[in-house]
Structure formats: C-alpha cells, structure tokens
Image: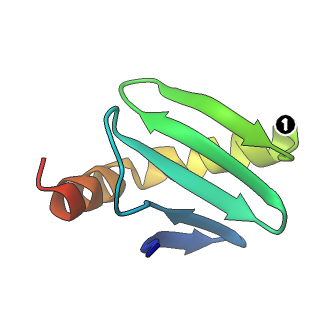
Amino acid sequence: MDTPTILYIQGFRFFFYLNEHEPTHIHVSRGDCTARIVLLSMLDITFNKGFKKKEIRDIIQILTDHHEKIIAAWHLAFKR
C-alpha cells in the first residue's frame, strides 16, 4: 500500500495511508517506533508504540508548526 510522506523532519516520517478514514489524522514513524495522531483543534495521540515522552513532545511541536500544510495535504489526498 502506498504511503505518501508529507514531512520528513528530525528523522520523523509523517505520512498518510491512501485508504485513510475520518477523523483527520497522520501517522509518524522513526526506526521501530510508530504513532497515530488525530489532527483536530487539539492534537490527540491515539496510538503510540515506542516513542518516549520527549519524542512525543518533539512530534507535537512539528505538527503544530506544520499544521496548515498537513491539513491541506489531507484534503488534497482525500478530496475532503
């Protein structure tokens, strides 16, 4: 399954699966770690396998800094 990368920052890969569903969310991976984060008004980590608290803080900061770009990419990819 294709997984387009939206951002690649500090070794974190932020991506969507092409068969995504609501709510609007993004996946992030680095090494063997992975997480799923809902991109609503408050960022909500709905799955975390392996990321430490500091890494989660870094991920949240990156998502906050690039929120508009990520939301635009979601709408473009899924025409929603």
The answer to which image quadrant residue 22 occupies is top left
Percent position of residue 33, x then y = 80, 56
The answer to which image quadrant residue 57 occupies is top right
Q: Residue at x 31, y 59 (%)?
A: 69
Q: Residue at x 54, y 27 (%)?
A: 44
Whether 57 is drawn above or below 1: the answer is above
Q: Mark 1 — residue?
A: 53
Secondary element at tag 1 = helix
| 46 or 11: nearer the viewer | 46
Percent position of residue 51, x then y = 83, 46
Whether 52 is drawn above or below 31: the answer is above
Residue 49 falls left or right of residue 1: right
Q: Residue at x 18, y 53 (%)?
A: 75
Q: Residue at x 43, y 61 (%)?
A: 17
| 28 or 60: nearer the viewer | 28
Whether 75 is drawn above or below 44: the answer is below
